[in-house]
Image: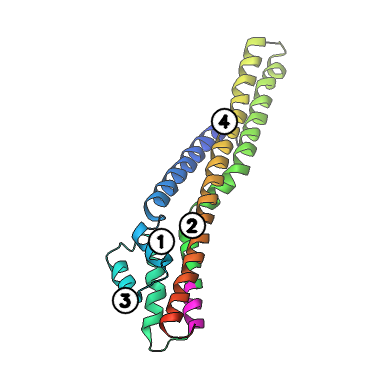
């Protein structure tokens, strides 16, 4: 049977898990979702050198989502001679979807925690209140200290559920915004790289 104690334990582990995901995703974004300045400047330059840009990417780690994305586009353009631009754009779109899924790993749990944590806390509170007021029915006597003490413990479940939900909400919103910005930049710079490739192929 579900009890107040089980609710607190579930909320504790849910809170720890949600906080772990927030910290891990934040560290991952800070480490792997920022474009190196020299790569950014090379892409934004009007005097773009495709060969020089390819060599520059080779010196960068594939763990960076921008580097991996650009390398995938260049690999698609060099795989077959006279590769059509529509094929390169298709490969870029597929890679962007893959990176989006990778960046969003674990976000579903934060989203679920925002709704589930308060409900679990409320369920624990209801069960705790039933137990607290059950003291009156079982003994036939009113024991104020026991009843109020039980009510206070039961309300702790709701407070804990709200705390977990608030932490998950702030973490989810911040990470969602950071991921959306990264994906927008990937799309913008990827489009620019494809345009440079078109110019290099003489299709512009």
Viewer-closest of 159 and 175: 175
**Other residues around mark 2 within 10 Å, as few (<14) / some (14–19) / many (≥20):** many
Element under disc 3: helix
Residue 87 in magenta stretch: yes
The picture places residue 19, in percent across and down from the top left corner, at 47, 40
Element under disc 4: helix
Labels 4, 3: front one:
3
Measured in 3D between alpha carbons, the distance from the residue under mark 4 to the one under mark 1, in whole angstroms, is 36 Å
- Indicate which disc, 4 or 1, sits on the residue closer to the N terminus: 1
The picture places residue 125, in percent across and down from the top left corner, at 64, 29
Measured in 3D between alpha carbons, the distance from the residue under mark 4 to the one under mark 3, in whole angstroms, is 57 Å
Which residue is drawn at the image coordinates 59% and 47% (left, top)?
112
- Indicate which disc, 2 or 1, sits on the residue closer to the N terminus: 1
Q: What span is colored magenta in the figure?
A: 85-92
81 sits to left or right of 90: left
Labels 2, 4: front one:
2
Please tell me how many numbered marks the rendered image carries: 4
Please say if the residues under marks 2 and 1 sit with CB atoms less than 8 Å apart. Answer: yes
Up-down: is 14 above or below 135? below
Up-down: is 15 above or below 86? above
Viewer can see residue 1: no
Name the residue carrying label 3: 51
99 sits to left or right of 62: right
Q: Which mark is residue 182?
A: 2
Q: Which mark is residue 160?
A: 4
Viewer can see residue 74: yes
Q: Quadrant of the N terminus?
A: top right
């Amino acid at each position: 049977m579900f009890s107040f104690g089980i609710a607190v334990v579930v909320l504790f582990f849910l809170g720890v898990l949600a906080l772990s995901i927030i910290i891990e995703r934040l560290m991952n974004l800070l480490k792997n979702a920022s474009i190196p300045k020299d790569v950014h400047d090379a892409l934004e330059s009007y005097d773009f050198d495709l060969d020089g840009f390819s060599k520059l990417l080779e010196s960068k780690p594939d763990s960076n989502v921008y580097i991996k994305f650009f390398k995938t586009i260049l690999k698609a353009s060099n795989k077959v001679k006279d590769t059509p631009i529509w094929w390169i754009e298709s490969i870029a779109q597929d890679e962007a979807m893959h990176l989006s899924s990778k960046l969003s790993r674990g976000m579903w749990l934060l989203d679920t925690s925002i709704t589930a944590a308060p409900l679990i806390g409320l369920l624990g509170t209801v069960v705790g209140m039933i137990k607290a007021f059950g003291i009156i029915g079982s003994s036939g006597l009113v024991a104020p200290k026991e009843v109020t003490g039980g009510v206070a413990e039961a309300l702790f479940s709701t407070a804990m559920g709200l705390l977990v939900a608030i932490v998950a909400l702030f973490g989810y919103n911040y990470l969602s915004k950071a991921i959306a910005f990264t994906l927008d930049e990937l799309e913008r710079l990827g489009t620019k790289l494809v345009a440079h490739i078109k110019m290099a192929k003489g299709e512009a």
